[in-house]
Amino acid sequence: MSLIVQKYGGTSLKNISIIKKVAKKIQSLNLAGTKVVVIVSAMGNTTDSLIKKAHQISKNPSPREMDILLSTGELVSSTLLSIALNSLKIPAISLSGSQAGIQTDINHGKARINSINPKRIFNELKKNKVVIIAGFQGTSLLEETTTLGRGGSDTTAVAIAASLNTDQCEIYTDVDGIFTADPRLVPKAQLLHQIAFEEMLEFASYGAKMDPRAIELAMTYKIPILVKSSTSNSLGSLISEDADMKKTIGEIKNKVRGIATDNNVAKITIRKLKDKPGTSASLFGLLASENVSVEDIVQNSSTGGFTDLSFTLKKPELQQALTILKNSQFNSNISTVETANNLAKISIIGTGMQNTPGYAAKMFRTLGNANINIEMIITSEIRITCIIHESDLQSAAQLLHTEFSLDKNNS
Ligand code: ASP
Ligand code: MG
């Protein structure tokens, strides 16, 4: 008998009538003889509103209490979906992350999954039940409830699929799949039917709304992910190894798969930092120890024993990072710290760009011709990223989308 793992995001469960529709979908799979394991997110904006409520009481709620609070969002959806299925006479059971055997480390708010013991899940499946698991949560070695960080139920879904050894993990959302660019910024964006893990990892890390950890996990365990709309009949996008490389070799002129954008970018530049071994290690070690996630780092070659260093981070973490730097030993070493919090990242991504010159030049020329200033440039083998002003993001995205022949009517 086949086994399917499906994840439903918050927008696909946002109210009771939608939850009933999801239950109907699962019912037809069940009646066709398929075993189904479902992972759910919290309904609609539940997580945001729980965070807001806590902050109305305290600026600094304890991370332990926050995790238990936030884990309730997913419990509401999993229990309601189970009730909906049972009322359709489909036997179903909801499980919390802990009951589903998800063990994490002890980092509240950003926990990582250490292991999954799927014994309980298998037992329930044997009893012919649909198993509905609350996403985004687990339990730590200290037997505390932990959450995996915003968007973490994708990661739960892939981890469960890996532990059950299924062929694929289906993720249902409110969009048709992965697009060549964010359709809200670029109306001519088109759906990608296939995309390679490596490319998707770059998309997710550089702006697409998907948790990069889920992709990393899928890549490690070679679990293809099918991203689909829960309401339309679109075929969705398959994220898998190598995507359609074989099919397109020799056919494809343009090796840019898509454009990722992110407008949640702040930058810190430290000028005249002492250029001696260990400086970066202690600077970034310090920020990491306070849980500030640094994204991209660029260091200049030094002159006269000093160097300039810039790094990007998410806007909400800027103030915290500055406070940490101010209270550190670096304060005396740093002559100037400059900050900006109105920036954005724009990236062109494609495995086919490897070893092919000219993409970077074309990207910079397109931006330059439009009078868009580049603040920082960062590259990987399959990605070129420019940091630009937030106000230039939309026109940059549209221009690059056209320049790299990604527009809908171009195909
Ligand atoms: N409900 C959590 C959040 O909004 C987890 C998730 O949706 O994946 O971040
Ligand atoms: Mg959510």
Image: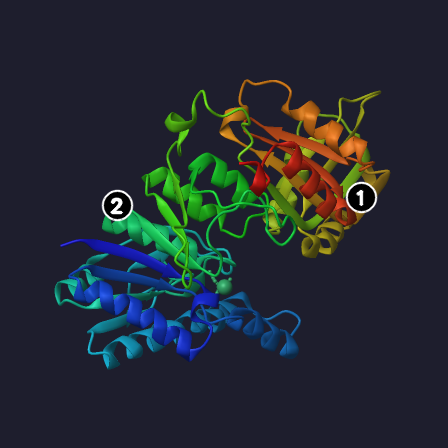
Q: Is residue 97 left or right of residue 87?
A: right
Q: What residue type is labelled 1?
A: Asn
Residue displayed at 75% across by 48% down:
390
Q: Is residue 255 left or right of residue 396?
A: left
Residue 227 or residue 110, whichever sits in front: 227
Q: Answer yes or no: do the residues labelled 2 and 1 have beta carbons within 8 Å?
A: no
Residue 385 or residue 233, whichever sits in front: 233
Residue displayed at 78% across by 39% down:
269
Mark 2 lies on a secondary structure that is: loop
Image quarter of the N terminus:
bottom left
Q: Position of residue 49 (x, y in %)?
A: 57, 74
Mark 1 lies on a secondary structure that is: helix
In the rendered structure, find residue 167 and report the number of the disc placed on it: 2
Residue displayed at 70% across by 31% down:
377
Rendered image quadrant of residue 260: top right
Most extreme residue toward the right is 335
Disc 2 and disc 1: Cα gap in Å?
Answer: 53 Å
Graded by Cα atoms within 10 Å as few (under 14), some (14 to 19) or many (20 or more), the crowding at tag 1 reads few
Residue 209 or residue 234, whichever sits in front: 234
Residue ID for mark 1: 331
